[in-house]
Image (cartoon, grey):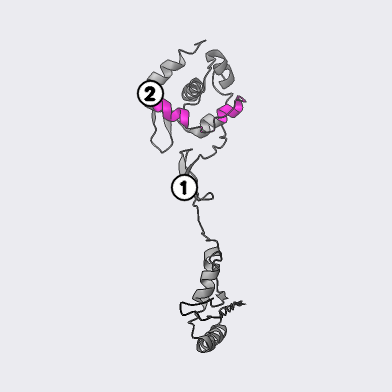
Amino acid sequence: MRNRDGNNEKGRVKFRFLEFEVEGGTPAIQEGLRNIAAALNRANGTTLKPVHSGSGRTLAPKTDATRAASDDQMTFDELAPAEVDAEVEHSEPENNEPVASQDTSSGRQKTIRQHRTPTILNLDLNAGSTPLKAFIAQKNPDTDSKKYLVIAAWLKEELKIDAITTDHIYTCFRWMSWNVPDDVGSPLRSMKKQGWFRSGKAKGEFEITHVGLGKVNETPNG
């Protein structure tokens, strides 16, 4: 190449690339890297700094020139996946009351409704002047809500149980070989809003009202 004065102008460019990787992060290894970096600094007048990752791995120093020449490369810190320890606390709801918990498996917070599985009680469902199955056959309830009302009315009249829980409903449903709702307490809470049940003295207890007893008599064969 000729310059403006007509003389040939020659030049030479040297490019040196140095990269190494050392496992571990002990003080001795780090001191060795600093010594190597200092020696290279004196040799070529370039400032080199060791790169440390959060995982205890020490990476080779890179010059500004090598960083510019390898824009598509990333340091270990940029490549290392983030690890998050999420602890989800699950509590056992009382009397089938819904409980919300957080699902973090997908990275998003999502509400999960959980319900306690009721237990079978030791009830004599053949007791009384009319056993439970015969009483249900008379009333012939065709919805879950009416089944709940009929069961509550029978327990009140024959077993003298005023306050019932989801355990009572679950026991009677299993006795009748009926499919149990996923949320056994949902119909009770709904009918409480309608005035067919009221809250008992203890948490999770429901008592059938005179309005609810009236609905039992409105069942098809009542």
In percent of width and height, residue 175 lies at: 60, 27
Q: Amino acid at mark 1?
A: Gln
In percent of width and height, residue 194 lies at: 38, 23
Q: Is residue 49 above or below residue 186?
A: below
Q: Secondary structure at mark 2?
A: helix
Q: Is residue 139 above or below residue 185?
A: above
Q: Secondary structure at mark 1?
A: loop
> Quick one: label 1 or label 2, which is nearer the N terminus?
1
Task: Identify the residue position indicated by label 2 in the image.
Answer: 194
Residue 54 visible from this viewpoint: no
Residue at point 57% right, 34% down? 122
Camera-side residue: 43 or 222? 43
Task: Identify the residue position indicated by label 1 in the image.
Answer: 109
Q: Amino acid at mark 2?
A: Gln
Camera-side residue: 159 or 4? 4
Q: Which residues are magenta?
A: 171-192
